Amino acid sequence: MRPPITPLPPRKSQYGIDPSLVKTRVSELPGMTSVLLKELFPDLPEVIYPGAEGVAAVRKATEAALAKIDMSKIKPEHSVNILASHHGFTLLGGEPYAEMLKTLKDVIETRTGCKNIRLRAGVGLRFRETEEYIKRYGLDKHFGGKAIGVAPIDQGIPIETEVGTLYGLRKAYDADWIVHAHNSDVREVHFHRQVDRAVKPFGMSYARIETRSTYHQNLGPRAANFTARAIFDSPFVQSKFAFASFLTVAPNGITGVDADNDLYALNDRVTRIGCRYYGKMMTLFGEIDECIAALDFPCPVVYVFSAGVIYANFAGSNTDLYDLDMPLPAYTWYTEAFYGKAGRPLLDDIPPVNPAIKMCVHNYAWTGYPSAFFSEHIPTVVVGQEQADLFNRDPQNLTYMQHAVVAESTEAAMEFAYKTTGTRKVIIFDGAMGGINVSEPLAELLLKKAPAVSERVDNELLPKWLRQRGVDMSVLKQGA
């Protein structure tokens, strides 16, 4: 068995406890090991990060991708908004995404002579989050003071679309041109279901809360994806769109940078990545029969990462989140709305939360996202009274601790979980790069199950997933 991979370190943030309070990481405990993702799925692509060149490899890949981009519309006297999203800063420490953003600014300026290039970084429900990232990665200095965070409660701008008036953020569109800077990581596949993933930020990070809430609460997964497409296809946005640049991500790391003047062509490539590579990890996670899930990553509860998969997706991995014939996942805000006061779903179409998760040990995770659903449906142990107090002060998590208990230490929490559940299988959501930190019994299970999962995804599930999304499947025969 391999030693555990060093997890991403805690970060100082208003949304989490002070890093000094994180005394022990779950991966440091006895019986923990790691599995390289290439051991599980040898066909995963080669990565440029993490690697020997560090973020220099990302800069090089961004420059190569932008060499094919037509920037002739951008004139020296124009202004450009590079539109970013907070999600990118949670990938592999955040440095790769920040480096792509810096390179975008440098290349646009060099190629076009335009010097009025601004960064507009959108957020979700943590309205000050991207302000922290802008300072942490020196983006404020690199953009000469023209880097700001934009929140869904900021001043809006009406956008006339084929389905009526929707609302974007005024600061996102207050330039002559916009550059859509995102990533191919699947993240919230339980929400977007890998439909128009590349277009999604136009209905989310760059949109007013009235419009983006349509996505979460009014129409739900699958149905709401058209709002982002309607905004992007609007004459207003099309008159400003210059091109898109995406950090391409697989479960094992950054594979490169992809850029295109045609967002829908890029969207097809993003869909293939999301279904082929992440689909294998999620299908494999669905093979886990029982486990303790340990949260140990600087992100809100739902967004902690393991092998490129977030906890919210693992909570629904007992079903196929990529299969569009399945109407509702086990978890989304829309799904929550169909739960009665007794805590049980009112519709037969709603599957249960993944029954393989016998307990959650919340060693380190942030506030800023409504997460009481998880502690209510999954027995949860929170490490440290300070972390419990933080959640009790968070307006979005006032009932989180009503369904959880507090342990004095990581060691005590894990011992409690072992004794209560009777399982020694542990999966750790700690953002380990290139692999996954797990307990030895779970490592053995994953290695045993992976070959059959890989064959099933390649031969059965992937063709179905791509066919459901209208994506050309001929590239599969070419090994793409």
Image (cartoon, grey):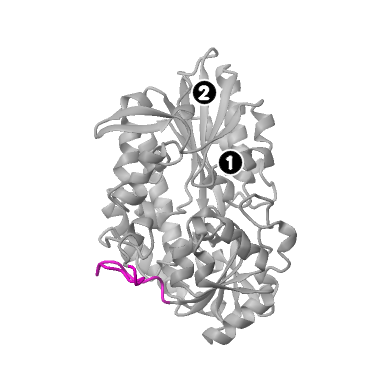
The reply to whether the magenta stretch includes residue 346 is: yes
94 is higher (above) or lower (below) than 103: below
Nearest to the observer: residue 343 or residue 203? 343
Query: Is residue 198 or residue 448 the one in the foreground?
Result: 198
| Whole-percent x, y for residue 82 in the image | 52, 30
Mark 1 element type = helix
Extent of the magenta region: 341-355
Given the current orientation, which residue lies at the most extreme top position?
Answer: 77
The residue wearing badge 2 is 80
Q: In the rendered view of the protein, which quadrant contains the N terminus?
A: bottom right
Does label 2 or label 1 sit earlier along the sequence? Answer: 2
> Which corner quadrant of the image does residue 275 belong to?
bottom left
Q: Secondary structure at mark 2?
A: strand
Q: Amino acid at mark 1?
A: Thr
Between disc 2 and disc 1, the foreground one is 1
> Could you tell me residue 170's position as x and y percent?
45, 27
Q: CA distance from mark 2 to mark 1?
A: 19 Å
Count of numbered circles in the view:
2
Q: Position of residue 407 (x, y in %)?
A: 64, 75
Residue 355's image quarter?
A: bottom left
Magenta span: chief secondary structure: loop
Q: Residues within 10 Å of mark 1 (few under 14, many from 20)?
A: many
Q: Label 2: how many residues lie within 10 Å, few (<14), some (14-19) or many (20+)?
A: many
Residue 329 vs residue 75: left or right?
left
Could you tell me residue 244's position as x and y percent? 46, 34
State the residue position of label 1: 130
Q: Is residue 419 left or right of residue 411?
A: left
Q: Residue at x 43, y 71 (%)?
A: 377
Going 40% across and 37% down the picture, which residue do you hit? 202
Question: Given the image, on which type of amino acid does mark 2 rest?
Answer: Val
